[in-house]
Image (cartoon, rainbow, N blue to C red):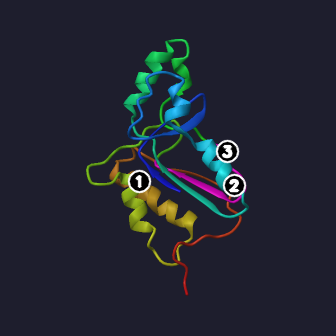
């Protein structure tokens, strides 16, 4: 799964926010956003290698709208960036930046994370965890160390997008 767009965390849960979401009241979160935990559960229902790339921790104005609607006492439950989720065996989750931080949009068509990912995903014979290290280095260079891509892996075997024939 690859997702690029707005994401947010509420009460430690990560949500992907569609472009047409309004999130004007707390009840709209479950109706308008997609719980990453639900996606993980669906993917992990079958034992296989699961790869999730989330370029979804950009500064989201909807999180401020939602925080205002829940009031001062509950607005602390709405965190900056994405939370660090747990995942099952055989799953790798790659984030545009480290948990709790906001990723940069960049200046081109794609964000720094997506640009670096597209550049390295085509490298033949490069194992995915090695590829993600190269992506991390590129993003840190592009953002002057303001953004550090993060991953959470419980892979049990090597994975290559383009293995040697």
For the residues labelled 3 and 1, the Cα–Cα distance comes to: 22 Å
Residue 148 appears left or right of 88: left
Instruction: Say if 54 sits above or below 118 in the image.
Output: above
Instruction: Give residue 80's position: percent from left, percent from top.
Output: 48, 31
Q: Is residue 155 left or right of residue 2?
A: right
N-terminal label among 3 and 1: 3
The quadrant of the rendering that contains the C terminus is bottom right
User: Which residue was labeled with disc 3?
Assistant: 86
Q: Please name the residue that numbered disc 1 is placed on.
A: 113
- How far is disc 3 from disc 2 in space, using C-alphas? 12 Å
Magenta stretch in the rendered image: 85-96
Tell me the mark number nearer the camera, choosing from 1 and 2. 2
In this rendering, the answer to whether 70 lies above or below 149 is above
Q: Residues within 10 Å of mark 3 (few under 14, many from 20)?
A: few
Q: Position of residue 137 (x, y in %)?
A: 43, 57
Residue 47 can be seen, yes or no:
yes
Distance between mark 1 and mark 2 Cα atoms: 25 Å
Disc 3 and disc 2 in contact, CB within 8 angstroms: no
Q: Quadrant of residue 159?
A: bottom right
Label 1 or label 2, whichever comes before in sequence order: 2
Asked whether 4 falls inside the magenta stretch, the response is no
39 or 158, which is in the foreground? 39
Q: Residue at x 47, y 51 (%)?
A: 3
Q: Which mark is residue 44?
A: 2
Where is residue 65 drawn, in percent x and y?
41, 23
Q: Residue at x 56, y 38 (%)?
A: 14
């Amino acid at each position: 799964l690859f997702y690029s767009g707005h994401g947010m965390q509420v009460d430690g849960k990560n949500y992907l926010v569609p472009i047409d979401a309004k999130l004007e009241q707390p009840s709209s979160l479950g109706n308008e956003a997609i719980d990453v935990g639900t996606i993980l559960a669906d993917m992990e229902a079958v034992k296989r290698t699961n790869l999730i790339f989330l370029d979804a921790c950009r500064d989201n104005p909807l999180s401020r709208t939602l925080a205002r609607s829940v009031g001062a006492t509950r607005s602390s439950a709405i965190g900056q960036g994405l939370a660090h989720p747990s995942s099952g065996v055989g799953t790798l989750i790659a984030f545009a930046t480290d948990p709790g931080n906001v990723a940069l949009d960049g200046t081109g068509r794609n964000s720094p994370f997506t640009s670096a990912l597209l550049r390295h995903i085509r490298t033949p014979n490069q194992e995915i965890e090695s590829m993600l290290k190269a992506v991390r280095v590129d993003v840190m260079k592009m953002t002057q160390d303001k953004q550090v891509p993060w991953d959470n892996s419980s892979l049990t075997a090597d994975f290559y997008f383009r293995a040697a024939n």
